[in-house]
Image: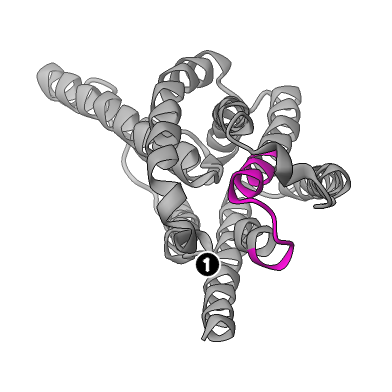
Amino acid sequence: MIVPILFIFCGFDLYLTLFSSLLVDCGNALVMTLIAAKHRQIDIRRGVLLAGFALVWVAGGIALGRAFIPGNEDFFRGSAGIITIIIGISFVIKGIKNKTAAGRNPSPVKENSLPAAQNKTEDGLRRFLIYVGVALMAFHIGFFGIGGGMGYAIFLMLFLSYPVLKATGTAMLMTFCSTLFAAGGLFFLIPESAFVNSGAQLLIPMMVGLSMLGTIAGAKIAYSLTERQINFLIGSVVIFAGLLASVQKYILQLMAA
């Protein structure tokens, strides 16, 4: 939602707009990474490894965006919220499944009840799919200038079976590295004239600071809830954001007409 607001209503240069969006995501990710580390809800080793892999795809997204953006600025005048809504629904579904699982009393399964070959195949497929997912989200960050924290978290839960807090904490570490790298790359594409009389020197730090304060407040609430409640909370907030972005896009289209 930040991109069309800054681009259309504030008249920011598009590269400056994407840079600002990434800084907001980067600040939020830094706060959540530190909070997750404090609560030991982060896999630093896995997060750093996947973040390093992601940077290659972030660079690819920036490179392709550099060729695509100059002739297609209208593409960034609205926010498509469908992907955000799908991610939110995924968290809600996980919360529902947690309730279902809690109501069951399954018989214990021995650790080695599955054939070794089957376990090895499934583990290999999951390792492959997590890298595919990370590559897609990282490319999205570089190309669109939007953080992929929740997308990273979904893939960690889906393919590596991380609990929601550990997935979110690890995803925030990955997002911090990805958005910092992407913001650095886009910074050098911003024309010098973009900072003249745009109010960016004041507005951008204020946006980042307020967003980080909101993240701190949200984290205090999240860490006081059960895992099932957290899934519902994240899902509800993300779905609301996706719906708001879709409405925003519709309003902007009416204004343009």
User: Is residue 10 highlighted in magenta?
Assistant: yes
Assign the N terminus to one quadrant of the image.
bottom right
Q: Which residues are magenta?
A: 8-23
Residue at screen point 38% across, 46% down: 68
Name which residue lies at 71% across and 37% down: 192
Residue 154 location, quadrant: top left
Q: Is residue 241 magenta?
A: no
Quick one: 32 or 223, which is closer to the camera?
32
Q: Percent from the top left, x then y, of residue 112?
A: 23, 20
Q: Amino acid at mark 1?
A: Gly
Residue 106 visible? The answer is: yes
Give the residue at x 49% y 55%: 91
Q: Is residue 71 above or below residue 191?
A: below
Lateral position of residue 120 relative to residue 65, left or right: left
Q: Which residue is mark 1?
A: 78
Asked whether 192 or 256 is in front, the reply is 192
User: Residue 187, image x and y in percent?
Assistant: 64, 32
